[in-house]
Amino acid sequence: MDLNSESNMDTINDMFGEFLIYNDQEKIQPGKSKEYYIGKAEYISNDISEDDLYEFLKVFLKRFEKLNETQQETIRNIVGIEQKEKIVYREKIVYREKKKQRPKLNVDDY
């Protein structure tokens, strides 16, 4: 079972959700201000080790493609990822059949 797929994680949460320990005070509330989410993120980042932070970020980056272009570009700038143009060269080999020519007669001017 691939644990990285979103549907498998949903299945795990459905099966074992009652056994997962999350404090109600730590739940993030929807519809709050930007500062609320920044504060929660700062709290989590200060409370987590670097090894755990790696796993934490992998989970969040699964949804990176769902962000709009401006948001993606902002995150790329913060992380220091430069977008590079990908130039692809393709060589097209064309084989041409030689036209069948009539045999040339060896005609000398006499």
Image (cartoon, rainbow, N blue to C red):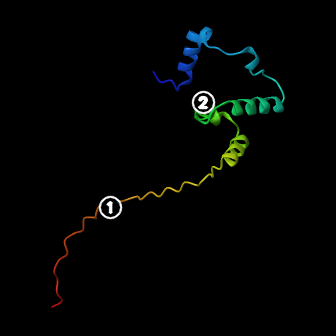
Q: How far is the residue under mark 2 from the one under mark 1?
A: 54 Å
Q: Residue at x 58, y 34 (%)?
A: 51
- Going by the numbered disc 2, the residue's amino acid type is Val
User: Residue 49: x percent and y percent?
Assistant: 63, 33
Q: Residue at x 58, y 55 (%)?
A: 85
In the rendered view, tell whether residue 77 sits above or below residue 25: below
Q: Residue at x 73, y 43 (%)?
A: 70
Q: In the picture, residue 64 is in which quadrant? A: top right
The kind of secondary structure element at disc 1 is loop
The image shows a total of numbered marks equal to 2
User: Residue 17: x percent and y percent?
Assistant: 61, 11
Q: Is residue 101 left or right of residue 23?
A: left
Q: In the picture, residue 32 is in which quadrant? A: top right
Q: Which is in the foreground here, disc 2 or disc 1?
A: 2
Q: Are marks 2 and 1 in contact (CB under 8 Å)?
A: no
Q: Is residue 16 left or right of residue 94?
A: right
User: Residue 89: x percent and y percent?
Assistant: 47, 58
- Going by the numbered disc 1, the residue's amino acid type is Arg
The kind of secondary structure element at disc 2 is helix
In the rendered view, tell whether residue 86 sits above or below residue 21: below
Residue at label 1? 96
User: Residue 100: x percent and y percent?
Assistant: 25, 64
Quick one: which residue is furthest to the bottom in this view? 110
Q: Residue at x 28, y 64 (%)?
A: 98
Q: Is residue 71 left or right of residue 90?
A: right
Q: Residues within 10 Å of mark 2 (few under 14, many from 20)?
A: few
Residue at label 2? 59
Q: Earlier in the sequence, mark 2 or mark 1?
A: 2
Q: Quadrant of the C terminus?
A: bottom left
Q: Quadrant of the N terminus?
A: top left
